[in-house]
Image (spheres, helix red, strand yellow):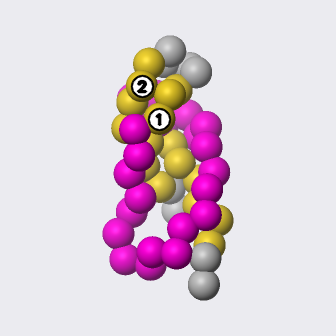
Amino acid sequence: MRKKVVLACEECGSRNYSTMSNKETDRLELKKYCKTCSNHTIHRETK
């Protein structure tokens, strides 16, 4: 079953993106644009 997850920036901690994930084991990591940092940074799944 897919669940809704929120992605937070590694640098500033801003929660910018939300997406759907069907993985239950590992945290999702994506390189996305952060409008707060004005840079492409790694965004990780939060709890």
Asked whether the beta carbons under mark 1 and mark 2 sit within 8 Å of each other, the answer is yes
Determine the image quadrant of residue 2. Answer: bottom right
Coordinates of residue 27 in the picture (x, y in percent): 39, 63
Q: Relative to 4, is 10 above or below?
A: above
Furthest toward the bottom, the residue is 1
Coordinates of residue 31 in the picture (x, y in percent): 40, 38
Q: Relative to 17, is 12 above or below?
A: above
In this orientation, which residue lies closer to the viewer: 25 or 21? 21
Coordinates of residue 24 in the picture (x, y in percent): 44, 78
Mark 1 or mark 2: whose residue is earlier in sequence? 1
For numbered disc 1, what is the local secondary structure? strand
Q: How crowded is mark 2: few (under 14 residues within 10 Å), some or many (20 or more)?
A: few
Residue ID at (62%, 72%): 3
Coordinates of residue 14 in the picture (x, y in percent): 55, 34
- Residue on which the image places disc 2: 40
Q: Considering the image in quadrants, where does the N terminus appear?
A: bottom right
Amino acid type at circle 2 is His
Residue ID at (50%, 28%): 33
- Residue on which the image places disc 1: 32
For numbered disc 2, what is the local secondary structure? strand
Q: Specify the segment rendered in magenta.
A: 9-31
Q: Relative to 45, is 21 above or below?
A: below
Determine the image quadrant of residue 43. Answer: top left
Q: Distance between the residues labelled 1 and 2?
A: 5 Å
Amino acid type at circle 1 is Lys
Relative horizontal placement of residue 41, taking residue 32 as reference (left or right): left
In this orientation, which residue lies closer to the viewer: 44 or 1? 1
